[in-house]
Image (cartoon, rainbow, N blue to C red):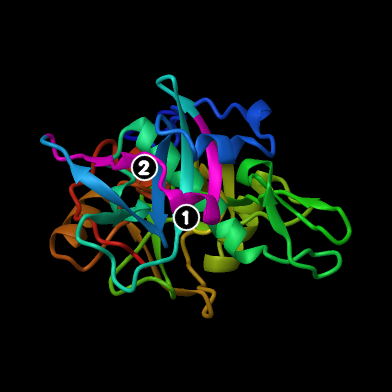
Amino acid sequence: MAGAGRSLPDVALTRMAIDRRSELRDPDLLPRLLGDDATRVFRLHGTATPVHETADGGVRLVLDAPEPGDVERLAVYLGEAGGRAHVGVVHLAREEQAPDERTLREAGALLDDLGASLFATTLALANWHRTHGHCPRCGARTVAAHAGWVRSCPEDGSDHYPRTDMAVIMAVVDDADRILLARNRAFRGRGMSVLAGFVEPGETLSAAVEREVGEEVGIGVTDVTYLGDQPWPFPASLMLGFRARALGTDLRLQEDEIAAARWFTRDELVAAVAEESVVVPGRVSIARRLIEHWFGGPLDAPEIPLR
């Protein structure tokens, strides 16, 4: 059977190419590194960063030396690679994205392992800092600490750590070996993807798969099999990828979340993508890899964001 392997190959953003050196995250680390021209700085402007296009069709991050103003900006120590310290520095978003800048959705599948690690980690931490500026205990303003990996409350002394939200994402396949794709109401235009949803408290991963499929399209599943995972900093998720076998094919859609859903054979999906009646997720996402795992190889499809 096509796509019968038990793991997903080449999932973007998953190969960690930097030693995080968490033991070095002391109060003096960032001021020292931002005063050293040997430090490599990754700059995030809102959600985008400058890149160079390479001759082979890829992209490479622009990493430069620290600037005097960096000590006043939000900075995070990312770790060491190639004998050099790397720091992520967060700038205010530009009014318009510069021509040489790319978002992680645009560049993630084209970056080398180091670039993908730096971008995904900085974006995830920046998203967390933006939304956790107050202490959940007393409401006071918190400050960045531990080289950007903690927010501390100066009023009650509590420390608060970055959150990662676990989400399951699953390729549901029926007994005729058709895959189920759905259009979330948040998707643009003709976008369709595999189902996904957040893990709830007190729930196992397989139970989350079964619940989400039941809620969104009204069918049961069995044979839930883990295939791989991916950090997904939009804003702060870890996507846990599964394949599951459908116990039925009659769909009842969750109207407030799912706009459309249907079963596809391989030939039907190829035809739908070719005629542009269906847009599938880009190569940066584990969703695309789950679809291609079922398909049995790469799917020829344009890189169009679903949202």
Q: Give the amino acid type for the residue marked by disc 2 in the picture.
A: Arg
Q: Secondary structure at mark 2?
A: helix
Could you say which is closer to the camera, residue 121 or residue 157? 157
Residue drawn at x 47%, y 45% is: 88
Residue 171, image x, y percentages: 45, 48
Q: Is residue 44 magenta?
A: no
| Quadrant where the C terminus is found in the figure | bottom left
As drawn, is 96 to the left or to the right of 75? Answer: left
> What separation in Å lies between label 2 and label 1 (alpha carbons)?
30 Å
Given contact means CB atoms under 8 Å apart, are the residues at marks 2 and 1 in contact? no
Q: Decide: is 55 above or below 301.
A: above
Q: Decide: is 282 above or below 27.
A: below
The tag earlier along the polypeptide, 2 or 1, is 1
Residue 160, image x, y percentages: 75, 52
As drawn, is 200 to the left or to the right of 303? Answer: right
Residue 126, image x, y percentages: 53, 55
| Quadrant where the N terminus is found in the figure | top left
The residue carrying pointer 2 sits among few (fewer than 14), some (14 to 19) or many (20 or more) residues within 10 Å by Cα, namely many
Which residue corresponds to mark 2?
Answer: 289
Q: Which residues are magenta?
A: 56-79
Q: Secondary structure at mark 1?
A: strand
Which residue corresponds to mark 1?
Answer: 90
Q: Give the amino acid type for the residue marked by disc 1 in the picture.
A: Val
Comparing marks 2 and 1, which lies closer to the viewer? Answer: 1
As drawn, is 266 to the left or to the right of 154? Answer: left
